[in-house]
Amino acid sequence: MSDSVVSISGLSKTFAKADITALDDISLEIGQREFVSLIGPSGCGKSTLLRAVGDIVEPTAGSVEVNGKPARRARLDGDYGIVFQAPVLYDWRTVAKNIALPLEMLGWDRARRVARVKEMVELVDLAGFEDHHPWQLSGGMQQRVSIARAFSFSPALLLMDEPFGALDEMTRERLNLELLRLWLETESTVIFVTHSISEAVFLSTRVVVMSARPGRVSAIVPIDLPQPRMAATREEARFFELVTEVREALHAGGADLA
Ligand SMILES: Nc1ncnc2c1ncn2[C@@H]1O[C@H](COP(=O)(O)OP(=O)(O)OP(=O)(O)O)[C@@H](O)[C@H]1O
Ligand SMILES: [Mg+2]
């Protein structure tokens, strides 16, 4: 058995009704504790690829294995957490109850849930807001709740689709740091979709560059910046070199993005 957490092999996806080939023959191995970003022009299939890994989209050809099991089995086993671009929170549930939701679904007893929620609330810096409802929070705070919820049950794999896309630059940079801290502490594997080259470089151990439709992997850029990354990492010469490398790979893949 390979030690890959995610093994994608010959994956293609055609949306028959729309006659769109979103993904064409993608193969990718992702190891334990990797942080892999997917970047590419709008419509190149990043969300579709993430959804195929999460068993939300059925591949037309090829296969996805997670922890050595078919994606379906891994989903049923609760092997991953998902964070979408817009935080999907339940308005009638408080912050604490939103974070506790997957724990309830997994059948954790009350004492264990309470202890974990407390821990997660502190990790994402929301202590004091446990009894607030989502509509009483800013967008950045709501996104932190959904990140806390996704991490709450320590899933082996986190799938994140542009979770910070709607946030201002300052909030985004702060959440980048929080995310990296959670990632280091929980020893999880992350697949992260973003449009931002600098965000991809800052967060990742590898950046996967996808080409315009049909989506293919056009380059893989290993990011050798030391861990833990800090705010000052963004000012290092190596950071700028890697940003340039990813930008050039995007252009070579036909991207019309920055
Ligand atoms: N359910 C669907 N039915 C038909 N076509 C779809 C469906 N989902 C995605 N597509 C098409 O597949 C292609 C890839 O879409 P996808 O959402 O994966 O792109 P993306 O890279 O995430 O784009 P963006 O950066 O804008 O979020 C697009 O052309 C899109 O129109
Ligand atoms: Mg998308």
Image (tube, grey):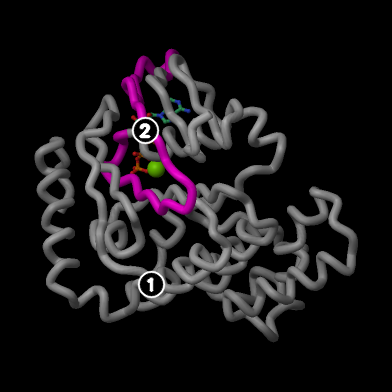
Residue 129 x %, y %: 68, 81
The residue depicted at 22 percent of the width and 48 percent of the height is: 221
Front one among 2 and 14: 2
Q: Which numbered dot is residue 228?
A: 1
SS state under label 1: loop
Which label number is shown at residue 28? Answer: 2
* View quadrant of ligand 1: top left
Q: Residue furthest bottom?
A: 128
Magenta stretch bounds: 15-44
Q: Please give the name of the residue rendered at 54% of the width and 75% of the height, measured from the top-left corner.
A: 138
Left or right of 20 in this view: 54: right
Identity of the amino acid at label 1? Pro
Rendered image quadrant of residue 170:
bottom left
Q: Nearer the viewer, residue 136 or 109?
A: 109
Q: Badge 1, how many Cα within 10 Å: few under 14, some, many 20+?
A: few
Residue visible at 51% across and 40% down in the picture: 5
Does label 2 or label 1 sit earlier along the sequence?
2
Which residue is most to the front? 1
Residue displayed at 19% across by 67% down: 239
Asked if disc 2 is less than 8 Å from ligand 1, the answer is: no
